[in-house]
Image (tube, rainbow, N blue to C red):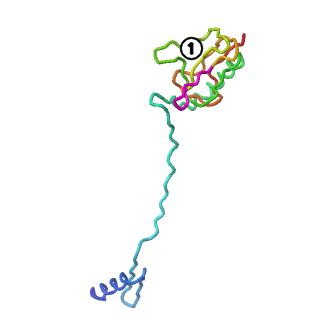
């Protein structure tokens, strides 16, 4: 088959609804395909993004160290009661960056006294003491993220 005939065949295929043309004779075999093969594209879902206020610094990930920390926290919890976070947010030990913390370890606090602030969605939620108690341990660092139910303080009721 010469080029003229080949061009004529291609023109015929492109001007009609034919998507594939195949011709086979003793001397040659011609296959003309039109269109695209279906392409399958796999897209991974985006990773979960955590939104926080501009000053938020995530704690470094240390999976192996997490188990001993949890084990160490259990004996401390047995030594006293815990004050847990009622909401998800950011723990603040003081009313401002340059201010003194609300409470310190060893301090005796009265019922209703502010222990810390947990910021949630730009709202500052004061966490108060439910009873007169002594602060045995402060479980979170300043500006650390807290989850619902996380221990904030270990206390001894008086």
In front here: 111 or 76?
A: 111
- Quadrant containing the N terminus is bottom left
Q: Which stretch appears magenta?
A: 119-127
Q: Residue at x 48, y 29 (%)?
A: 56
Picture coordinates of residue 117 (x, y %)?
A: 57, 22
How far across and how far down the image is residue 96, in percent?
Answer: 48, 18
Residue 79: image x %, image y %?
A: 71, 16
Residue found 70% across the figure and 18% down from its top: 81
Give the total of numbered labels.
1
Q: Mark 1 points at which residue?
A: 102
Choose top left, top right, bottom left or bottom right for residue 84.
Answer: top right
Q: Residue at x 51, y 12 (%)?
A: 100
**Helix, strand or loop for the magenta stretch, by majority:** strand
Q: Residue at x 60, y 20 (%)?
A: 139
In the image, residue 24 above or below residue 55: below
Q: In which quarter of the image is residue 102?
A: top right
Question: For this rendering, which residue is in front, 78 or 85?
Answer: 85
Residue 31 among magenta residues: no
**157 is higher (above) or lower (below) than 92:** above
Q: In this view, does 35 lie to the left or right of 85?
A: left
Structural crowding at the residue carrying mark 1, measured as other residues with C-alpha within 10 Å and reported as few (<14), some (14–19) or many (≥20): some
Q: Quadrant of the C terminus?
A: top right
Question: Foreground residue, 66 or 100?
Answer: 100
- Coordinates of residue 107 in the picture (x, y in percent): 62, 8
- 121, 142: nearer the viewer: 121
Side (left or right) of 61 relative to 128: left
> SS for tag 1?
loop
């Amino acid at each position: 088959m010469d080029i003229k005939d080949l061009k004529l065949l291609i023109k015929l295929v492109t001007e009609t609804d034919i998507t594939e043309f195949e011709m086979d004779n003793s001397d040659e075999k011609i296959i003309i395909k039109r269109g695209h093969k279906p392409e399958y594209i796999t897209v991974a879902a985006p990773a979960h993004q955590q939104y926080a206020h501009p000053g938020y610094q995530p704690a470094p990930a240390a999976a192996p160290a997490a188990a001993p920390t949890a084990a160490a926290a259990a004996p401390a919890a047995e030594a006293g009661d815990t004050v847990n976070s009622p909401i998800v947010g950011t723990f603040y030990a003081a009313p401002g960056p340059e201010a003194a913390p609300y409470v310190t370890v060893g301090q005796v606090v009265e019922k209703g006294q502010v222990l810390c602030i947990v910021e949630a969605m730009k709202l500052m939620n004061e966490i108060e003491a439910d009873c007169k108690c002594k602060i045995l341990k402060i479980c979170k660092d300043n500006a650390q993220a807290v989850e619902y139910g996380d221990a904030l303080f270990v206390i001894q009721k008086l």
